[in-house]
Amino acid sequence: MIAVVESDELVVAVAQHAPVPGDVAENARRAAAAVADAAGADLLLFPLLSLTGYDLRRLAERASWATPDDPRLDVVREASRAHGVTTVVGAAWSAPDGRRLLASVALLPDGGVEVAGKQYLSRAERDLFEPGEPAPPLDVRGWRVALAVCFDAAAPEHALEMARRGADVYAVSALYTDGQERRLDVHPAARAMDHRMYALVANLAGAGPGWRSCGGSGVWHPDGRRLVEAGTGPRVVTARLARAELERLRAADAVAGYRG
């Protein structure tokens, strides 16, 4: 067995992305271009349903669903391999066992695919998807990266379960809309601070049926501070995460008796 070496730093990129509505192939091409532009990052996170946009009516079309062997994703797989980036896209996912998930799909540099389905679905989403099961964190250069989908981040028990599984990073693919700016800041800050892990949020950009994005994608420190912010339009922001910061805060919590 090859031992996994924990890197001292992890470079993350968060894409505030406005998809072409319903066009999985074009959105995959744009994701691949973003991977190339973010060369040097270890992880690139896209928002909720980044392959289609958030319009549930479009999911009546079979072409809006992605599958594990979907050739439209090959361009992202190849970019991830070529640049050594773990790329997380948002998809309506048709699993081999027949489950339909509102998913974050991680395309790994070695060609592997890991899927985390949204657990806390809205009423409208429950007509199309089934709740996902807790997924183990990804290994990205020795860092444990947990995937969360939108409202999962509003449920403290979701982050608690990921922390119990050893997560160092809590990566949320989301849609936060106008008027939800405070929620967008509080959710990742609280999850990061409570569990001493970094938090990332990739929010959709633009607008869709009945909603307009509030922007605000970014990265939060494990003490709850926001490190970077994307503003309101399409943009990719990056941050360099330091393992020493995690260890410092976790050690202080252990001394105070807050960690086992």
Image (cartoon, rainbow, N blue to C red):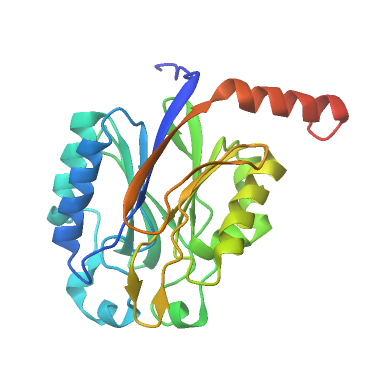
Tell which of 1 and 204 is nearer to you.
204
- Percent of width and height locating residue 180: 55, 68
In this rendering, the answer to whether 225 lies above or below 27 is: above
- The answer to whether residue 195 is left or right of residue 137 is right
Snapshot quadrant of residue 78? top left
Residue drawn 63% across and 37% down? 222
- In the displayed structure, 8 sits above or below 158; it is above
| Residue 238, image quadrant | top left
Question: In screen coordinates, is 187 left or right of 150?
Answer: right
Query: Which corner quadrant holds the N terminus?
Result: top left
The residue depicted at 24 percent of the width and 59 percent of the height is 67
Q: Quadrant of residue 55?
A: bottom left
Residue 227 location (% of width, % of height): 54, 39
Task: Say which quadrant the C terminus sits in.
Answer: top right
Q: Residue at x 34, y 31 (%)?
A: 41
6 vs 22, nearest the viewer: 22
What is the x, y in percent for residue 65?
25, 68
Q: Does residue 174 appear in the picture of this structure?
A: yes
Compared with residue 199, is residue 250 higher up or lower down, i.e. above or below? above
Image height check: is 108 above or below 2? below
Residue 72: x, y in percent? 14, 56
